[in-house]
Image (tube, rainbow, N blue to C red):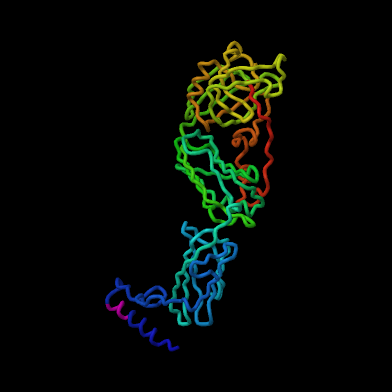
Amino acid sequence: MSQSPRIRTISSCTLLVAALGAGVTACGGSDGHPLSAQPYDAAGQIAVNAPAGSQKADPDKPLEITAQGDEARITDVTATDAAGRRLAGELSVDGARWHSTAPLAAGAQYTVRVSTEDEDGAPGRKVMTFGTRTAPAKKQLKVELGPGDGTYGVGQPVTASLSAPVKGKKARAVVERALKVRSIPATEGSWYWVDSETLHYRPKEYWPAHATVSVSSSLGGIKVGDRLWGAETKPLRFTTGDRVEAVTDAASHTMTVYRNGEEIRSIPVTTGKPGYSTRNGVKVVLGKEYFVRMRGTSIGIPEGTADSYNLPVYYATRLTDTGEYVHAAPWSVGSQGSANVSHGCVGMSTGNAAWFFETVRQGDITRTINSFGEDMPVFGNGLGDWNMGWKKWRQGSALLPGGKDGPAAVEAARLRPAV
């Protein structure tokens, strides 16, 4: 085909631009083609393996687009689903073939835009749509996000509970990449795979006070593993309150409570006696119960023995799954501030316990120091997430080189209320 007509057109435009001044640029595009020339319909120059009409594509198969004959080549392809997720793909150097490099989403509607050019460089365009088959319900991976909407303390981790185990770093990376956590103000954070069905997310430091945290999942319809597809997930939004931290020094028998870095109260307390020493470390407040009945039999103490107990307990703020609380202990007021006589809980007067109960909320930070007890486990007995250093926490992500591809060891602990 002769090139002279096109050359003459471009020359004419150049002369016109020169005559009218540099401000006139509407004559031609950056590719040398007149802007008035619309892309031609490239339907006859490409082939797509997606079904036409109402038929649905198999999401387990890659999307392929090929150029037909020698008269055209593919220059660009974008494939986006209705949720705005772009399908990753790869175009061959010669422009003869484009194929997806990531799985198609199940139950999704895709819009595909293909750009081509013919042997003269003229641009072509084709836009097409198709849907994919939905995944069977029994093959859908559901995600339950926690803690729930509301206001929490700055130590509250985000949790993600999966409806089926996910093993292997590749599959875990798919899940983790789809779970988005954003905070205002922004803060650095990371997911940690506690086990094959549980993830925790926490910032490097505690959340900022009065922050807004939004958690969402784009896993719906995404292939996770062999015939396992993500389900839609309800998003989560919560806020944080003041930074409230209670530090219990078992050696001085004192709890000091801080709000936003300033001391607001010092409370005489008693902690665990020998054989029942309170655990050291950070424990996030799990909840509050106005009344709890605590029995020694729940921790293996036989009735009628010297250490047995069966007590009504008020203003009980729970710190662990195994029954460690901060609570009213009117029976030990004489020892509070001077001796450790409890079975592991932090006991204080009824007035102080009521004040503490009203002051703290779920997610606030408590920390025990100078006890002869064991260290609070990171997982398996409440929320001990902050007892792991940031560097090691980051290694629990499946998205980092050398990250986790197997379940973490979860420290087991017996469920036991201790007073």
In the rendered view, does 19 fall on the left or right side of 60?
A: left
Residue segment shown in magenta: 15-19
Task: Give x and y (percent) for residue 408.
Answer: 67, 42
Q: Is residue 175 above or below residue 267?
A: below
Q: Is residue 375 above or below residue 267?
A: below
Task: Give x and y (percent) for residue 163.
Answer: 60, 46
Residue located farthest toward the left when viewing the structure as drawn = 20
In the rendered view, does 255 fall on the left or right side of 407?
A: left
Magenta stretch: dominant SS? helix
Residue located farthest toward the top when viewing the structure as drawn = 334
Q: Between residues 303 and 385, which one lies in front from this camera angle?
A: 303
Q: Is residue 102 visible?
A: no
- Seen at 45% across and 79% down, the residue is 121
Res 339 quadrant in image: top right
Where's the N terminus, which quadrant?
Answer: bottom left
Q: Is residue 23 visible?
A: yes
Residue 37 within the segment the image draws in magenta: no
- Seen at 49% across and 29% down, the residue is 261
Task: Give x and y (percent) for residue 410.
Answer: 67, 38
Task: Give x and y (percent) for residue 96.
Answer: 55, 76
Where's the C terminus, which quadrant?
Answer: top right
How many numbered markers are drawn?
Answer: 0
Res 101 quadrant in image: bottom right
Q: Is residue 286 above or below residue 183?
A: above
Q: Between residues 235 and 281, which one lies in front from this camera angle?
A: 235
